[in-house]
Image (cartoon, grey):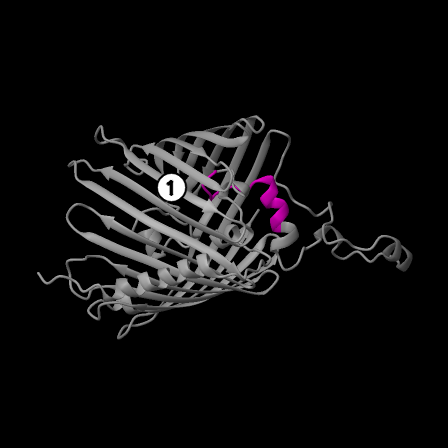
Amino acid sequence: MERKTPGGFLRSQNLLAGLAIAILGSPHWGISSARAEPYLAIQEGYKCSKCHVNMTGGGKRTDFANVYVQTRLAHTFLDWQRLGSKPDKNEEKDNPVKTDSQSSFFSGRLNEYIAIGGDFRGLFEAAKPPGRAATETFSQRKQNIYLEIGLIPERVTFYQTLAEGGDAREIFGLLTGELKGEPYYFKVGQFFLPFGLRLQDDTAFTRSATGFTYGTTDVGLEVGFEPGPWTLHVAASNGTGSSLETNRAKRLTASAAYVHKRFRLGGSFTTNKGAQNAATVIGSIHGGAQFGRVGILAEAAVIDDSVDEQRVSIVELNLLLARGHNLKFSYEYYDPSSAVFQNARERFSLVYEPFLNQFTQFRVGVRDNRGIPQNPGFNANLLFVELHLFF
């Protein structure tokens, strides 16, 4: 069989090299108002644990994130308590309407010990493969309810995610503390493994090809330590995607990142043996930086299953048009087999993401898929509109 030429992957490597040069060599930095997904952390210099109860990101937002979303993320704070009210001129002059009205602010905290959160995504997609009829589909991409119980506040936490059909996607106990003033944690239960950039889009090649999506959790133990600008996470799990254990081997997953106020660099690694004792090793590098209103992030991964290699990468640009209005462009590359000649896939995406108010986001986007001509699905043009409700 003819060996695959590396041209497409080298293009991705060149893009990543350009990112690294920009991060390490540019003397000019800018900070803009941040939005959501991993570029939130990159733009503000935050670690994932700043905004998520799950220390490696995803799921329920922390109290800090709830305040941030409602006071800085959204284009408009909808003060629903004042809708329809018409104060007289003297009252309006003496008590002007504030955009952070406490009466309309929602924290998700029921009391000192219990807090809830949620995400709902409704999606419309119109796909047009070449030479075939167009298809139009409505679907529910996500409907999650999050429960956080602080048994001992800031020390012992019970956490659970109820997903589609009432399934417990994540359910774990979290023990947190400090070692010489630096935070650490232990996590035991069913959870997302700490690998790569936790992009919102599960169809992204770096998510779907590596298997680290929001639909895949595992059961095990995770430890983390976040000294200074560093984040370090190591997990040992069954490696069966929350199914019954099939052998004695355990999956090991680790990630590390250096988080600066204006950029981030990191890497992830995982190894797992299946029921036939065949090992799969995945390694990735990722990073990002902010230049005024423009943010950039990138990730590249190699998947080695002892028989063949897969290579996948993404480069994403985000432009802040105005507060709460983000324009995203991304390029993705996926080589499903290094042993097969010219079978790589590419994907170009342009997405407009307005956060209309503190609980509502729309995403409107187009995608151009390119792959082998024998598969029309790999070459389909896609239009999608998504409604995201969150709290």
**Secondary structure beneath disc 1?**
strand
Q: Is residue 63 found inside the magenta-colored segment of the image?
A: yes
Q: Position of residue 314 (x, y in %)?
A: 36, 59
Q: Circle 1 sits on which residue?
A: 255
Residue 306 or residue 327, whichever sits in front: 306
Q: Is residue 11 above or below residue 49?
A: below
Residue 96 or residue 45, whichever sits in front: 45
Residue 69 or residue 290, whichever sits in front: 290
Q: Is residue 215 found inside the magenta-colored segment of the image?
A: no
Q: Quadrant of residue 205?
A: bottom left
Q: Report crowding for label 1: few under 14, some 14 to 19, many 20 or more residues within 10 A (C-alpha).
A: many
| x 72%, y 50%: residue | 100
Q: Quadrant of residue 115?
A: top right
Q: Provide the residue span drawn in magenta.
A: 55-69
Q: Position of residue 165 (x, y in %)?
A: 41, 42
Q: Position of residue 320 (x, y in %)?
A: 56, 64
In this orientation, does residue 75 appear?
yes
Q: Quadrant of residue 344?
A: bottom left
| x 23%, y 54%: residue | 310
Q: Furthest residue to the left? A: 1
The quadrant of the rendering that contains the N terminus is bottom left
Q: Position of residue 360 (x, y in %)?
A: 57, 55
